[in-house]
Each structure stands twice: as C-alpha cells, then as structure tokens.
Image: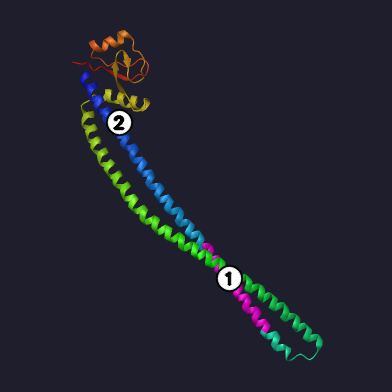
C-alpha cells in the first residue's frame, strides 16, 4: 500500500502542476479575449462615427439641393418682374423673392453648420483610425507574446499528462478512482501527510490509535475529519 500511496503523492503533485498551468493558461486566454475586445471596441466606435459622417453628408446634400431649388426660384421670380404690368403682381413677386432669399440664407447657414460638423467629425475619425491602427499593431505584438506563453503551457501540460498516464497505470484502478473522487471533493488534494499527530490537510488532531496505526499498518487510512488519504513519512 505504501508504494501505491507514494505513487499517488507523485500523481497528485503532477495534477497540482497541471491545475496551476491550466489556471495560468486560462488567464492568458482571457488576456487574448480582452485584447480582442479592446480592439473591437475602438473599431466599432470608428464605424459608428463613419455612420454619423455619412448621415451628415446626406443631410448636407439635401440642404444643397433645397438651396439650388430656392436659387432657381429667385432667378425665375426676378425674371417675371420684367413682365409684370400691375403693382399688385409686382408686390406679390417681391414678396416671393424676399421669402426665397430669406430661406436661401437659412439654408446657407445650415449648410455651413453641417460642413463644420462634417469637418470636425472627419478629423475625429482620422484620429480614432490612427489610434485603431496603433492599437492593432501593439495588440498583435502582445497577442503573439501571450500565445507563446499559451503554447509553452500546452507543451508542459502535455508532458505532465504523459507522466500522469505512466504513473496511473501502476496504481490499482479502484484506488485511482477513489483518489480522483477525493480530489474533486477536496479542492484537488486527495492525499496528505500525517505529521506530529495531525492531518496536514485539515490540520485537525488525529486519534492516537489511528495515528499510531500509520507506523504499523500498510492499509489505506483516511483522516476521520476530511476523509483524505493519509501517508506517513518517517525520517531515517
């Protein structure tokens, strides 16, 4: 039994290494996801701004079309003035021209405002695009570093897995199954040392008779408190 317990200790050490490396791998994987999220967030902001710019340009084009219409109306109305024969008709045309000129001025002012907004937004988009390009370049380098770390961990995990398989084959199947079940219930620690009458897993005092039996017996003994397997390392 002692030989099997020593093998289980060795297996547990490998399992804990794998657990730690898988935890490190998950951290690195999350970092990659976060880097991708940051780039996507900036990219999305650029796309939103481009959509806003397209809308402003469309609105300006509509204003320019209305301005062209009013300019045509003014030209036609002024041309009609030469053919007017009555004062009443003349006053009506003057009124039309005055209203058209007022509307023209308003449209020109709106076009100027739209143009200023377009210019400002275009500059903002250019700045954001530069930030995006720089971020993508930096992120690409950072992701390569992180991926190298992930690849290294994968190699180490694979090597540990091969060692685990070799050790597991030398342990009785029933004992191995019990070990796996204990690891799942006890935060990855299934076998612990007994020292100075205490369980190193839960740090509770062991009954003297049980503790003494660890010196005499080669049977599997569990801690009565945490149910972990106990192994005694006697100093020479």
Which residue is rendered at x = 46% and y = 63% of the image?
Answer: 126
Q: Which of these two is toward me, 79 or 191?
A: 79
Residue sitting farthest toward the left? 236
Q: Which of these two is toward me, 10 or 86?
A: 86
Which circle marks residue 60 in the picture?
1
Magenta residues (range)? 51-74
Which residue is rendered at x = 63% and y = 76% of the image?
Answer: 67
The answer to whether residue 88 is magenta is no
Q: Which residue is mark 2?
A: 16
Which residue is rendered at x = 34% and y = 10% of the image?
Answer: 207
Measuring from the top left, give residue 62's x and y in whole percent: 60, 72
- In the rendered image, which quarter contains the N terminus? top left
Horizontally, residue 189 falls left or right of residue 34, namely left
Horizontally, residue 120 falls left or right of residue 172, namely right
**Quarter occupied by residue 167:** top left
Q: Compare marks 2 and 1 and give the one earlier in the sequence.
A: 2
Horizontally, residue 55 falls left or right of residue 142, namely right
Which residue is rendered at x = 25% and y = 25% of the image?
Answer: 9
Which circle marks residue 81 in the picture?
none
203, above or below 128, in the image: above
């Amino acid at each position: 039994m002692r030989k099997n317990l020593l093998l289980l200790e060795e297996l547990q050490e490998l399992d804990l290494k794998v657990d730690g490396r898988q935890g490190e791998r998950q951290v690195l994987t999350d970092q990659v996801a976060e880097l991708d999220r940051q780039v996507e967030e900036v990219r999305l902001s650029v796309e939103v701004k481009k959509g806003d710019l397209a809308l402003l340009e469309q609105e300006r084009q509509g204003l320019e079309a209305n301005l062209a219409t009013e300019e045509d109306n003014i030209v036609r109305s002024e041309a009609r003035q030469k053919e007017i024969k009555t004062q009443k008709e003349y006053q009506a045309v003057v009124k039309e021209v005055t209203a058209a000129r007022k509307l023209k001025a308003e449209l020109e002012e709106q076009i100027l405002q739209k143009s200023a907004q377009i210019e400002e937004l275009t500059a903002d988009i250019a700045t954001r695009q530069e930030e995006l390009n720089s971020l993508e370049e930096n992120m690409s380098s950072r992701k390569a570093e992180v991926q190298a770390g992930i690849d290294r961990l994968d190699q180490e995990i694979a090597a540990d897995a091969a060692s685990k398989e070799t050790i597991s084959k030398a342990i009785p199947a029933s004992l191995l199954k019990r070990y796996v079940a204990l690891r799942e219930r006890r935060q990855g620690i299934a076998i612990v040392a007994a020292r100075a009458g205490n369980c190193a897993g839960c740090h509770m005092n062991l009954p003297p008779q049980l503790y003494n039996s660890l010196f005499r017996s080669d049977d599997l003994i569990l801690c009565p408190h945490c149910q972990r397997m106990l192994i005694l390392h006697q100093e020479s």
